[in-house]
Structures are given as C-alpha cells and as structure tokens.
Image (cartoon, rainbow, N blue to C red):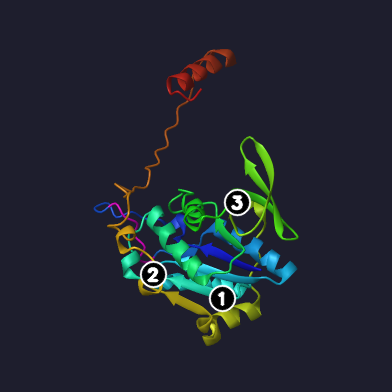
C-alpha cells in the first residue's frame, strides 16, 4: 500500500500581520508551522503504516522553505518527501493549486490513499482536497473522523453537523482529516536526527513545472480563475456597559432589549 499525504506550510496564526498597502500577508519574520489538520492527516497515515507496513510519501507545494514541513514529516515517520516548487506556481488559487498537486500525485503514481487536511488555517477554504480528488477522478470522503482498513477496502466515519455517517470505499480514495481523527505523535530523537541530516535531504525530491504535466495557462496567478481582493485583520474593539435598574428583573429586561437591538438574540 502506498499513501500520499498533502501538507502545507502556513504562518503561525498568532503571528499573522497584514501589509496595509497591498493587503497581503507579511511572511518575513513570521514563524511557519505544519497546517494542523494536515498533521492529523499525516498521523492517520502513519497509523496505517505502523499497522500494515505501507509506504508513506509526504507532498508539499510552496517555496523552498516549505521543505521544513517535509523534514518534520520524515522525523515523524514518513518514508519520502516531495516538494513542488517553482516560481511559475506562485499566486495559484485553490483551483490552480489542486491542478499542480494532482499532477504531482499522478507523477508519483501507484497510490492507494491520498490524505489531506480538512482545510488550511491561512485560507480556510476546504477546497483543495476535494478539487484534487476531482482532478484525479477518484472518490473522496471529507471530514473524516475514523478510518479502519478492511481488507482491500476502507471503513470511514464522516463527521457532519447532522451526525456521523459510515462509508465503505475501495481504493484509490482521497480522505480529508479533521482534528477529532487522532492526536498527532511527536517526532522521535532518532527521526529528527535522520530527517535533518544529509540523508534526510536526499529523501526529498523536488518537482518543478518541467517535471509535471500541467497546462501553464491553468496555473499561477494568471491561470487562477479567482483572486483575493483584500486581506485584513479584524479590529477588535471591546466596549463595556453597566446596566442600571431598580431590580434584577428591570436589569434583565433592559439587557434583553439591548441584545435584541444588536441582533444578538
């Protein structure tokens, strides 16, 4: 069995800053982390690997520094990393990103399961995983809360706001993970040493636009059908008010009226 896990390097949301002139994220000097939902996807792939001895390949698209999340994946137990990196990919929206990643997955080939996180904390679109499945023309199950391997099939629990649904699916299949799926493990000392030595570097391949079968008119900023008009950090203003009244009942009535005026109830 071969499992591919898609990982994204994202800015630590506690440190996000916006360039007020351009409306874009300021990434210089901002710590980057592995997207949390992607880490849950990685952990579930590692659990299957531990159980069945599967081959696990971690894939990430981004600038050269995105190699850091691949090294973290190697430290946790992944067998190989693939960095998809080229200036031609810059500015890609979710459609273009999924186009590029699906082409990389097809190049890797012979996969049984593709794991993605539900969504990335820097965009929150939850679109890339499902779009990858569409481009690969394989089944998809999103918001996955549990996975069990049943012979050649998978039994998958999907979480929704209306309840949980149990599916049985054949492979290949794409699954998107939520945080309730598991608790990601910590890298071992041995894994960290091996991942960050030269041997770890040798286990990471780099795919450029020349390595992938993609239409250059469908990727990058110019090939993206959508664009971000403006990004900003919401201004948090705290205002307090003391409600006066002769009795507790009067105060309660006044509070209800004020909440109703603010459309909060």
Magenta-colored span: 23-29
Which residue is found at the position 61% from the left and 72% from the top?
A: 78
Whether 36 is drawn above or below 161: the answer is below
Give the number of the mark in front: 3 or 1. Answer: 1
Q: Which residue is mark 3?
A: 178
Q: Which mark is residue 80?
A: 1
Left/right placement of residue 73 relative to residue 222 reads right
Q: Main secondary structure of the magenta part?
A: loop
Q: Earlier in the sequence, mark 2 or mark 1?
A: 2
- Of labels 3 and 1, earlier in sequence is 1
| Closer to the camera in the image, 4 or 70 | 4
Helix, strand or loop status at disc 2: loop
Measured from the top left, where is residue 253 in percent x and y?
53, 14
Residue 63 shows which numbered tag? 2
User: Can you tell which mark lies on residue 207?
Assistant: none
Q: Position of residue 237 (x, y in %)?
A: 39, 38
Give the residue drawn at x 71%, y 72%. Answer: 53
Residue 138 in percent (x, y) is at 55, 55
Marks 3/1: CA–CA distance: 23 Å
Could you tell me which secondary element the residue under label 3 belongs to? loop
Of residues 45 and 186, the one drawn nearer to the viewer in this rendering = 45
């Amino acid at each position: 069995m071969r499992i591919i896990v898609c990982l994204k390097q994202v800015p630590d949301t506690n440190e996000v800053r916006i360039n007020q002139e351009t409306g874009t994220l300021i990434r210089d000097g901002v710590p980057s982390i592995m997207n949390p939902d992607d880490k849950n996807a990685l952990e579930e792939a590692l659990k299957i690997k531990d159980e069945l001895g599967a081959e696990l390949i971690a894939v990430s698209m981004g600038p050269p520094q995105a190699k850091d999340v691949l090294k973290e994946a190697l430290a946790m137990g992944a067998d190989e990393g693939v960095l998809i990196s080229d200036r031609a990919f810059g500015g890609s929206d979710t459609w273009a990103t999924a186009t590029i990643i699906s082409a990389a997955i097809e190049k890797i080939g012979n996969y049984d399961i593709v794991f993605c996180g539900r969504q990335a904390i820097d965009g929150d679109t939850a679109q890339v995983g499902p779009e990858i499945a569409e481009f690969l023309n394989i089944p998809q199950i999103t918001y996955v809360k549990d996975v069990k391997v049943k012979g050649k099939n998978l039994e998958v629990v999907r979480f929704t706001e209306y309840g949980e649904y149990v599916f049985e699916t054949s492979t290949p299949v794409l699954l998107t993970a939520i945080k309730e799926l598991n608790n990601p493990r910590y890298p071992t000392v041995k894994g960290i040493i091996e991942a960050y030595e030269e041997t770890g570097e040798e286990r990471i391949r780099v795919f450029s636009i020349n390595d992938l079968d993609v239409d250059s008119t469908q990727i990058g900023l110019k090939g993206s059908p959508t664009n971000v008009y403006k990004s900003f950090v919401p201004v948090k203003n705290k205002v307090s008010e003391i409600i006066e009244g002769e009795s507790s009942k009067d105060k309660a009535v006044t509070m209800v009226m004020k909440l109703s005026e603010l459309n909060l109830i």
